[in-house]
Image (cartoon, grey):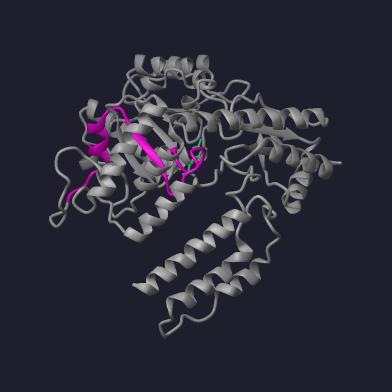
Amino acid sequence: MEELSGLFHMAADHAADYRRSLPDRPVAAPVDQARLADAFSGPLPSAPSPPERVLADLVAAAGPGLVASAGPRYFGFVVGGALPAATAADILAAGWDQFATNAITSPAAIAAETAAGAWLKELLGIPASASVGFVTGCQAANTVGLAAARHQVLAEAGWDVERRGLLGAPPIRVIAGEERHATIDRSLRLLGFGTDVVEPVPADPNGATDLGSLRAVLQAGSPGPTIVCLQSGNVNTGACDRLREACELVHRHGGWAHVDGAFGLWAAASPETRHLVDGLETADSWACDGHKWLNLPYDSGFAFCARPGAHAAAMSYAAEYLVGSGGTPAGADLTPESSRRARGFAVWAGLRELGRDGVAALVGRCCALARRFAGGLTSAGFEVANEVVLNQVLVGFGDDARTDRVVAAVQADGTCWAGGTTWRGRRLMRISVSNATTTEADVDRSVAAITRLAA
Ligand SMILES: *Cc1c(COP(=O)(O)O)cnc(C)c1O
């Protein structure tokens, strides 16, 4: 046991030292991928190794290939840096090594999910009666939401999709914004719909689903089983669909409204941005991430469903040897995974660490910093291509080739990191402010570096 304690301390000390270095290290140091691969490769050892030796070798091998994406000047994708208590709780989840399938296999894991789920619903303004599946991320949450939708719209048409599948089933219309996230399409593939099923709805100028077009698409088809995918937080622009009006349209046509709100749903947690997701409580299912804007460790997403019965019908499974939790569906009854990491501990810890005010401040601060970015880059003479409504900023530096050169130069420089994207046929730099530790000084330093490199 002494040895185990030494080993765990080594890992924790190393992780803490690494975290402490984040504000000062180059965000993405140039990597020789072949050398990195070499450090990990070699023949499968035939003999066991002492754990301390294994850990030391891992630290040495991985070091040169780590990206400081948890640091304050990483603006790529929509990436946060895991909060201290949430990270420590995740370390405990590994140490406790719980099998979080249900309340028999880990009563503590399910209790943490139950409490954290209630807090999440309260923060987001999702009805308290909704079910919550703690999944690996928003991709999985979209799959779960759409599986529940598939169950319900077909049940209403007299078809048991869990038993009979989609072959021979009544046709389902799937309507989605043309600027939906690509994971919606993968969820549709996994669920047997295929991607050709999608009837796309044009977007408004900032990338939200255009309501008039949604109405027209709904009216153009025949009534019957219908699923509509809405979005809070366009992955390029941050634009949010007008959920109250959109859900009303969907429901008037007897459809199911699913909201992909991987990061944008968090607009609900701040009084300054709450209006962007007005009416979200009227949707039927919601997908959201913990590991993006909430700054939780990776492998953390939430699938909420207004109809817990449809959610469980789509996801739960039984086997002779399995002991269920009995009564209310929980844990693996609401997710696509069977054996599961106890990810609820980190969610519970992160929410306790921030509190309601802390979550609101995190969302408000990131939006203010995104506006500061946009202001700084506009003053420097560059073009901000989107209306900055949330934490996303798109920047053009002239023609596509020049923008790509600036993005590459910024990534190589290491002061900050931003990705490139194509939006409405143009190459743009995509800046996402999602980290709890980012300061005004970090933004100013990044604007100065981008300006210098673009000159
Ligand atoms: C990131 C994102 C997803 C996918 O989430 P993962 O956590 O990567 O699975 C889905 N939708 C939107 C809008 C996103 O931003």
Residue 292 inside the magenta-drawn segment:
yes
| Position of residue 350 in the picture relative to residue 415 (left or right) | left
User: Can residue 228 be seen?
Assistant: no
Query: What residue occupies the far bottom of the structure in this picture?
Result: 47
Query: What residue occupies the far right of the structure in this picture?
Result: 455
Residue 139 lies, in percent from the top left, at 44, 43
Residue 286 lies, in percent from the top left, at 39, 31
Relative height, residue 416 to residue 154 (above, below): below
Name the foreground residue: 49 vs 83.
83
Residue 327 lies, in percent from the top left, at 14, 39
| Position of residue 106 in the picture relative to residue 428 (left or right) | left
* Residue for point 43% across, 66% down: 8
| Position of residue 169 in the picture relative to residue 297 (left or right) | left
User: Can residue 109 be seen?
Assistant: yes
Relative height, residue 18 to residue 189 (above, below): below
* Residue for point 26% across, 48% down: 108
* Residue for point 64% across, 66% down: 33
| Position of residue 192 in the picture relative to residue 393 (left or right) | left
What residue range appears in magenta?
Answer: 289-318
Residue 239's quadrant in the figure? top right
Residue 401's quadrant in the figure? top right
* Residue for point 70% across, 46% down: 416
Residue 219 lies, in percent from the top left, at 42, 15
Relative height, residue 197 to residue 6 (above, below): above
Name the foreground residue: 107 vs 426.
107
Report the quarter where the N terminus lies.
Answer: bottom left
